[in-house]
Amino acid sequence: MSSIENASSTEKQVSPSASKNIVHLEAASQRSQDVLITEPPADGGKSERMVKLKTDLFILPLLASIYFLAQMGRSDLGNAKVAGLDDDLSLTPDMYSNVASIFIAGYLVFQLPGTLLLRQIGPSFQFSGAMILWGVITVCTVKATSYGQLMAIRFLIGVIEAFIQGSILYLSFWYRYTELATRGAIVYSTSALAGSFNGLLSYGVQKDLGGRNGWTAWQWIFFIEGMIPIIWGFVVLALLPPTPEQVRFGFTEDEKKMIMTRSRAAHNTGNGTIRPKLILKLLIDPKFWMTTIVNCGNHYCANALQNFIPALLHESMGYSELQSQLMSVIVYAVTFVSIIGSCWVSDRLKMRGPVIMADSALSCVGLVLLLLLSQPAGRLVAACITAAGAYPIVVLTLTWTATNHPGYTYRASAAALINVFSQAVAIAGNMSFDDPPFYRKGLGSSLGMIALSGVVAGLLDWYLKILNAKKKREQHTPEAEILRQMSIDEVGNKHPDFFYTY
């Protein structure tokens, strides 16, 4: 649902102060007035469809590849565990949980600066530099001989990967709100493909490379998965467009103007100024905290699944080490379809909350089945259902965050801080999976947390509708007219012509 209302729209949110088919704020550097720009129809003409297609072709494959390789870097630990990492380094279940969690701790330290600095550093430099650095450190894992060394390495990888977590923020520079969830799904769904690819790669490594040149299978896994981002990082540096204001090649002048029009329609100003006051305002915004709870509840479950799916398949379902690597491919393949499907439905229906609630319910069904069933085939199906419900919520929540927090500082800070709190909760999720082989404590607590996520999503959906109704009633008050003289980058979602997506 578009965040600036259109007077001719048949949707639920309509701004009385808007003129037909217009009224999107330029919100550039002027403090004295907002510059209104005419926005092409949401379905676009031929020229806009061409711009959108070219933007998709330039950005989505590269951004998806970045996220794909980042997800490989996260989930390789689970595959390395099955390949003998915990035996060779004498890791207890608690130690392994700590290694999985310390990776997240790196995120907590650098998530906010890594997101806020995206415009200052430049997306192409920031993303490619992070890829090269985490690849180098992943290769260094080959030489790890102790629990302490592995903890240090995983922490550093987490720190560096925090600098590529602005993917939804970057996409919001280029796409309309009603296009964002589907594009985010294309990027984020690569996490499922990465899990599948990791399973296939680990299967091949264990089968053919284990013991070759004196390296164990888990050493080969880390070496191969470290070299790939090092090489690909230079491709990203050369080809990824930086921002709409700095498009270098591939678009005509008219197309560049269309890109700017579309970017302004999503409340991007091109100004990377960081406004600390808006960060403080964000922290007292109940909508921010409700969105955070939605994401935290889901992350508790989704992040743990990422690290423990191979172990669940191997330890509680009776599959061999090699079989469990292959079976994890099935789980992630189902998840890939679910992410694309849920986000496509969300964009088509122009709603986030109800879709998140449905996905939460689906994941709850899967977790209940995992707790109750004992047969391997039934538990495998339950694992697929759980992951299919949990993973789409991640991108839907981030999209919801981007559309309801306009302006660079407000949007970047919201995306970063929601991730910070969610990753902190994810540490607790990892720590709860400490009772092999069935991991009932972790599965039970995940059930409670993802149910909480769905309930709060419903409450937030209801609250945003109330706020939109209040904004409509106050369109012509003196306070609203004063706020209209300020840019949306200064006042964020308090601007009277901004309406919430629900």
Image (cartoon, helix red, strand yellow):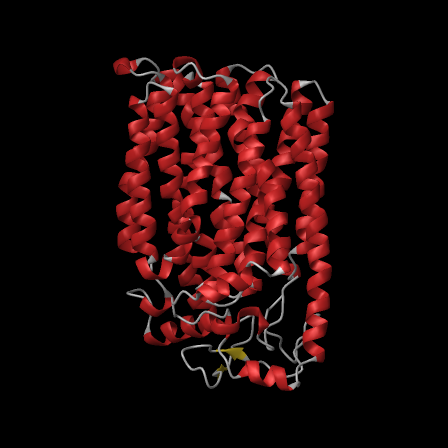
Q: Is residue 302 above or below residue 472?
A: above
Residue 440 location (% of width, % of height): 66, 23
- Can residue 76 be seen in the rendering of this structure? yes
* Quadrant showing the C terminus: bottom right
Residue 405 location (% of width, % of height): 54, 63
Question: Which residue appears at 49% of the width and 83% of the height?
Answer: 34
Which residue is more in the foreground, 164 or 463? Answer: 463
Q: Is residue 342 above or below residue 201?
A: below
* Quadrant showing the N terminus: bottom right
Residue 138 location (% of width, % of height): 33, 32
Which residue is more in the foreground, 403 or 490? Answer: 490
Residue 380 location (% of width, % of height): 63, 25
Residue 389 vs residue 33: left or right?
A: right
Question: Which residue appears at 69% of the width and 77% of the height?
Answer: 472
The answer to which image quadrant residue 351 occupies is: bottom right
- Can residue 18 be seen in the rendering of this structure? no
Question: Which residue appears at 60% of the width and 17% of the height?
Answer: 437
Q: How many marks?
A: 0
